[in-house]
Image (tube, rainbow, N blue to C red):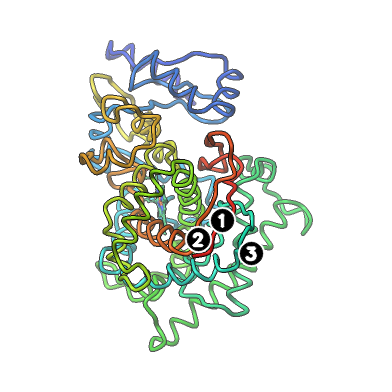
Amino acid sequence: MISLRQRLKQSSNQTNSKLPAGPNDSQFLQTLWIILKPMNYLERIEKRYGDIFYSPPFAGIPAQIIISNPQAIQTLFTADPKLFNSGEGNKIIQPLVGSNSLILLDGERHLQQRKLLMPPFHGERMRTYGQVISETTENVITKLKLGQKFIARPLMQEISLTVILRTIFGLEEGERYQKIKKLLSGMLDIFNFPLSAVFLFFKFLQRDLGPFSPWGRFLRQRQQLDELLYQEIRERRNQPDSQGEDILSLLLLARDENGQPMTDEELRDELMTMLFAGHETTATALAWALYWIHYLPEVREKLLSELNSIDINNAEPMEIAKLPYLNAVCSETLRIYPIAFFTLARILQEPMEFMGYQLPKGMILSGCIYLTHHRPDIYPQPKRFKPERFLERQFSPYEYLPFGGGNRRCLGAAFAMFEMKLVLATILSHYSLELLEKRPLLPVRRGLTFTPAGGVRLRVKEVI
Ligand code: HEM
């Protein structure tokens, strides 16, 4: 079979066109750099080769073109969805989310499934989830005592996991809820520890060698979880009267263009997808926000004065979500260290002229969110945390893209922003916290996302 490298070469020869330039560091050095110093690595390459560069294959990651040029990003996000596939590039998470997962789908099925999944995440619907978010935050943080030290990331994860189980699955306290929570946390953790994640990368390790082998344990946990999820789905289908306002209830009522409901398998896979894509990302974003708010006293003061300008304890969630400085702080948090450094990969389905380059079928393009968010021509002094930039001007979806864009834009973007704002408002109005980090924190890789090294250590200074 002809390799992508050969195809690229053939294509370049045929069209006499040039592919973007890129580094040719030895694979080993490149791998080391990107693991140890991902930001420096990306910045170094961009400085040398520009904002559209070719990244050779390394450490199992295929060759691709990395872009941080807004015009190129616009071309990518607005291209005919038929030109690019993304789902086929995400096979690695199939054992967890199942083959019907939105993240794994392409073409017509992806479009159809997105149509079914979108409504619960839109505008007015958010109102319903506000109460749950604020209530959950209060329940989790009231365990904190005066003087207590804690690490923000796991605490935020406790909040985001509970929120997602309540808003998406409609699950409340009880035996099934506790079991699902425990099984899910265990399975999702697999992705965060390189050693245990090894078997996801290599198919030949995916063999059931009994309950104590990694793959065997994973399969047994997944089976237990599936039994609980299918029980929940079946019960709800059989009791239409007891349906609440959670996302599962809405999905049970959803019908496609032919009037068909989603199957149990589709429901299970999409629930797992939302859980996988939604809870760690939001928890990490919250940990970063708490870091910046307490690292820069002037940011905290401005935020408190804005929160105090409304009756925070009786305010409608929507009123809180509209506060301009709170919105600017959350936006700047996702700009400076985006949770995902890259968009999902886009795999070209036919040859294409792209920004003056001739790209062959099979070429992969990825938007680099980190580099785009650090362009000094769009964000002066990009290394500084300055929420004011979001009050001074509006950025286009090709300049500011923490949630990606186009036909693959994050399904939970509005939900995540809403959750961030309500959780932060609730914490800041209950506690005065002190940051225990003496040095600036940098992002480190955790599974597929980048999180603050050490998780952000804080201490309760005052209970309000
Ligand atoms: C701060 C929190 C979050 C961040 C930073 C984030 C970021 C992203 C990014 C960068 C993508 C890829 C988009 C692209 O390639 O264009 C994505 C996709 C996705 N996200 Fe999120 N996300 C967050 C929270 C959530 C939540 C709460 C949910 C669901 C409850 C969710 C569900 C999804 C799904 C289903 C996709 C795949 C969409 C598709 O393939 O069509 N995310 N997210």
State the image coordinates of residue 35 (x, y, percent, origin top left). Answer: 58, 29
Q: Could you give the CA–CA distance between mark 2 and mark 3, rounded to whole angstroms?
A: 32 Å
Q: Residues within 10 Å of mark 3 (few under 14, many from 20)?
A: some
State the image coordinates of residue 409 (x, y, percent, origin top left). Answer: 32, 48
Residue 456 higher or lower than 158, as above or below: above
Closer to the chain start, of discs 1 and 2, is 2
| Count of marks, rendered view | 3
Q: Which numbered disc covers residue 461? A: 1
Contact between marks 1 and 2 (CB within 8 A): the answer is yes
Circle 3 residue: 183
Q: Amino acid at mark 3?
A: Leu
Residue 11 higher or lower than 192, as above or below: above
State the image coordinates of residue 385 (x, y, percent, origin top left). Answer: 39, 37
* Residue pictured at 77% horizontal, 59% vertical: 211
Which one is in front, 150 or 79? 150
Residue 51 lies left or right of residue 166; in this view the side is: left
Q: Which quadrant of the structure image shows residue 5? A: top left
Q: Which quadrant of the structure image shows residue 85? A: top left
* Residue pictured at 47% horizontal, 21% vertical: 56
Kindly tell me whether mark 1's CB lies below 8 Å from ligand 1.
no
Q: Amino acid at mark 2?
A: Tyr
